[in-house]
Image (spheres, rainbow, N blue to C red):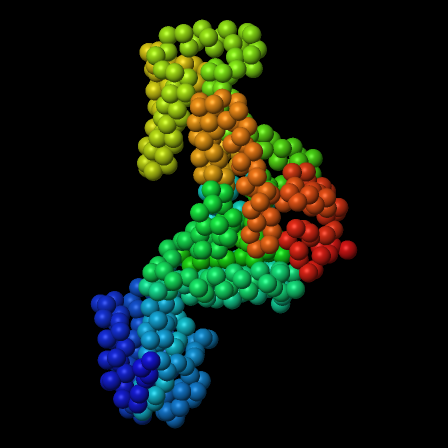
Amino acid sequence: MKQVNANVDESAAALKKLLPADDILQFCFTDGTGRRMICLFADAVTDKDLLGEQVFRPLMQYTGGEKAKQVAAHVTAPEVRTERALEKLAAEVLAGNPVLVWEGMDEGLVVGTKKVPARAVTEPPTDVAIKGPREGFVEDVKLNTALVRKRLKTGELRIEFLTVGRRSQTSVALCWLDGTSVQSTVDEIRSKLSAIDIDAVPDSSYLARFLSGRPYSLVKQVGTTEKPDIFCAKIAEGRVGVLADGSPIALTLPYMLIEDFQSGEDYFVPAARATFTRFLRLFALLVAIYLPAFYIASQLFKLQLLPVKLLLTIAGSIRDIPLSPSLEMLLVLLVLEVLNEASIRMPKYVGMALSVVGALVLGETAVSAGFVSTPAIIIIAFSGIGLYAVPNLIEETSVLRLMMLLAAGSVGTYGIILLSAFVLIYLVSTENYGVPLAAPFAPFIRRDLRDALMKYNLISLKERSQTIGSPNKRRQK
């Protein structure tokens, strides 16, 4: 690895060779004794006003020695360090930290005057809360770690930075509480992050694939959140957090499926209300997955599953429908997915208009024309609404709903039961970082049921989750 030498022109030329882009600027000046100094910095991500005030102005009046420590002491920037390797200096320039080389010295000076454009801290659109904090993570990892420090003012909080991605050089922050998180889990996550060999990491979802025990699993194995309060609460429970520069989505490990049925707002409302809403989310999700499948199975194989009056109503509505029940339901489901995708990708106000047109005009016209039946429209609409009761599981449950629909159309109720048994066995047998995905129900852990579907009063939650296995078991005395 090449290093800085005493010839300032050669050092600057070598750095410029590594950084040939036009936005890498070079500024030459002399200090108070006439020694030549050259500063290289990235135009878009460096605070040039701060660079001039804290670096150029003091050094132009500098008349001291040539040693790096003497020069660094004269610079008024709070973050100053030395480095000899040219490749590391080039990486600092790309990160937004200017690099200074000067005549007669074989070290480069790295000055922390980075100024990366960042979005303001606002409420995340994916997790809106009526009660509780409304701050959300942004795309700057340093700002995100500040939001974590704001809530966990303890010396036990550890934040370790790693660099992932050969070309993107993405800064990744590993966060945990020393003495509360399981150290073996921290070491395993650090090892997996260090082993990632990929060109670029534009978002934390890339990291989630590498951190999963089963990367090809249908069910996700890494928790996600956009809210600092939820992120800190999970770290305080003994989990390990991962923040990636450029992404507002934070990762938490290990992950349990029950987490997505819980909400941050559950801890700011009475326990009875939180328990009710959790069971309501589970009910809505089960209805969303199974209702279309049972509707198809009852029409094709088991008519006795339906009450007589409801059966007569359905029979009257589907009398002139040209499609079979399975094809009809698949068609309506496909139209719903297309409308959902289009409304998300379209501009905000156009998307709202598209949703109204698709839901009202298109649905009403299809029913009036006798192309689809009214019950099919109602069932798919109710199923689509139910999926959004647990928004973090939409991707998994929408695929599972389609699989249930195909199984019901093929072999009826038996197909639904067999597929449900397969999914249940898969969930029970899956674990990540030593924590079962279906805990605390499989394996059954009585103590952790106090904050599973049921929500006990905060005073009753004196101990941390036994499933995670934190060495610090007591939450409160």
| Residue at image coords 44%, 47% | 216
Q: Quadrant of the N terminus?
A: bottom left
Residue 34 visible, this orientation: yes
Residue 120 visible, this orientation: no
x, y percent for residue 441: 65, 41
Up the image or down, 187 lies above or below 85; here it is: above
In this image, 104 relative to 147: left or right? left
x, y percent for residue 8: 27, 86
Residue 83 found in image quarter: bottom left
| Residue at image coords 62%, 35% | 278
x, y percent for residue 288: 51, 28
x, y percent for residue 430: 56, 46
Up the image or down, 37 lies above or below 174; here it is: below
107 or 70: nearer the eye?
A: 107
Q: Quadrant of the C terminus?
A: bottom right
| Residue at image coords 60%, 54% | 434
Up the image or down, 291 lies above or below 95; here it is: above
In this image, 235 relative to 455: left or right? left
Residue 309 found in image quarter: top right
| Residue at image coords 42%, 10% | 318
306 or 71: nearer the eye?
A: 306
